[in-house]
């Protein structure tokens, strides 16, 4: 299947959505995203970290150190109130763009 | 003076702690990928190589994360504020300078402020957009 390289804003939106259910460490977030996008989007795991750090800087997410499922120390990320608001805004924006593109592509 | 040295040492230690935490976080990720791959039947050397491949450019990631951390640094913010103050002072001095020397001092002050800001913005821009 052809893979598409992901854009910065899209990755942030995927991370925000992934963290809505529970706090996760970077590896968990990467796995969840890989499962969700089903190899359609090409995402290197490493690209998550600058995005996570940027999102933490903007206070969309916060982090804490905890224990992973195999009892190792890991840094967990969780969504903040500002992050939820950002997710709502970005999702709405994404839907608007997607609808507009569909309309354009559907025009003969 | 002693307070300044203590502050700088504390800042250095905090920066080092941040770097260690980043190292630990990235190492955890790489080791978890390798562990999963070993469990799915891959040999340990192949799993390590595949984990690096899936992760991407480790050095670039490390560099970008540290650059983002640096942006949050209060000293960095203080430098930015000082540069703005320097520019405003230079502008005021330029407007009211009565001698050539004061005029040159004002020009120098504004030039340093503009160049300093440009340098800081360029560094921030690179860390924001290089991925």
Image (cartoon, grey):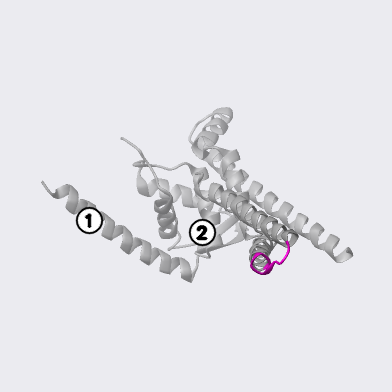
What is the number of the mark on residue A100?
1
The kind of secondary structure element at disc 1 is: helix
Residue nearest the viewer, comparing A84 with B82 = B82
Q: Residues within 10 Å of mark 1 (few under 14, many from 20)?
A: few
Identity of the residue furthest to the front in this view = B99
Q: Is residue B35 above or below residue B17?
A: above
Point out the image quarter for the N terminus of chain A.
Answer: top left
Q: Give me the chain letter of mark 2.
A: A
Span highlighted in magenta in the image: B93-99
What is the number of the mark on residue A68?
none
Q: Residues within 10 Å of mark 2 (few under 14, many from 20)?
A: some
The kind of secondary structure element at disc 2 is: helix
**In the displayed structure image, the side of residue B35 where residue A2 appears, left or right:** left
Residue A70 visible in rendering: no
What is the number of the mark on residue A55?
2
Question: Image point 63% across, 52% down: which residue?
Answer: B115
The label nearer to you, 2 versus 1, is: 1
Q: Does residue B94 belong to the magenta stretch?
A: yes
Q: Give me the chain letter of mark 1.
A: A
Residue B17, position as x, y percentages in the image:
72, 54
**In the displayed structure image, the side of residue B20 where residue A75 appears, left or right:** left
Marks 2 and 1, how far apart at CA: 27 Å
Residue A60, position as x, y percentages in the image:
49, 64
Residue A12, position as x, y percentages in the image:
44, 55
């Amino acid at each position: 299947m052809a893979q598409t390289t992901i854009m910065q804003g899209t990755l942030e939106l995927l991370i925000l959505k992934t963290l809505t259910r529970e706090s996760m460490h970077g590896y968990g977030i990467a796995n969840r995203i890989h499962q969700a996008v089903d190899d359609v989007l090409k995402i290197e795991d490493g690209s998550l970290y600058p995005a996570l750090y940027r999102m933490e800087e903007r206070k969309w997410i916060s982090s804490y150190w905890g224990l992973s499922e195999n009892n190792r120390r890991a840094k967990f990320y969780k969504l903040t109130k500002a992050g939820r608001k950002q997710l709502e805004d970005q999702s709405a924006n994404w839907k608007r763009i997607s609808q507009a593109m569909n309309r354009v592509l559907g025009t003969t | 003076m002693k307070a300044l040295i203590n502050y700088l040492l504390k800042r250095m230690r905090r920066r080092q702690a941040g770097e260690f935490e980043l190292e630990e976080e990235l190492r955890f990720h790489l080791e978890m990928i390798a562990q999963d791959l070993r469990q799915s039947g891959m040999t340990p050397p192949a799993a390590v190589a595949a984990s690096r491949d899936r992760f991407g450019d480790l050095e670039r990631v490390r560099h970008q994360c540290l650059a983002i951390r640096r942006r949050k640094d209060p000293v960095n913010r203080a430098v930015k504020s000082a540069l703005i103050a320097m520019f405003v002072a230079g502008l005021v001095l330029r407007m009211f300078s009565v001698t050539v020397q004061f005029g040159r001092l004002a020009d120098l002050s504004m030039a340093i402020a503009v160049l300093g800001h440009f340098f800081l913005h360029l560094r921030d821009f690179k860390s924001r957009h290089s991925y």
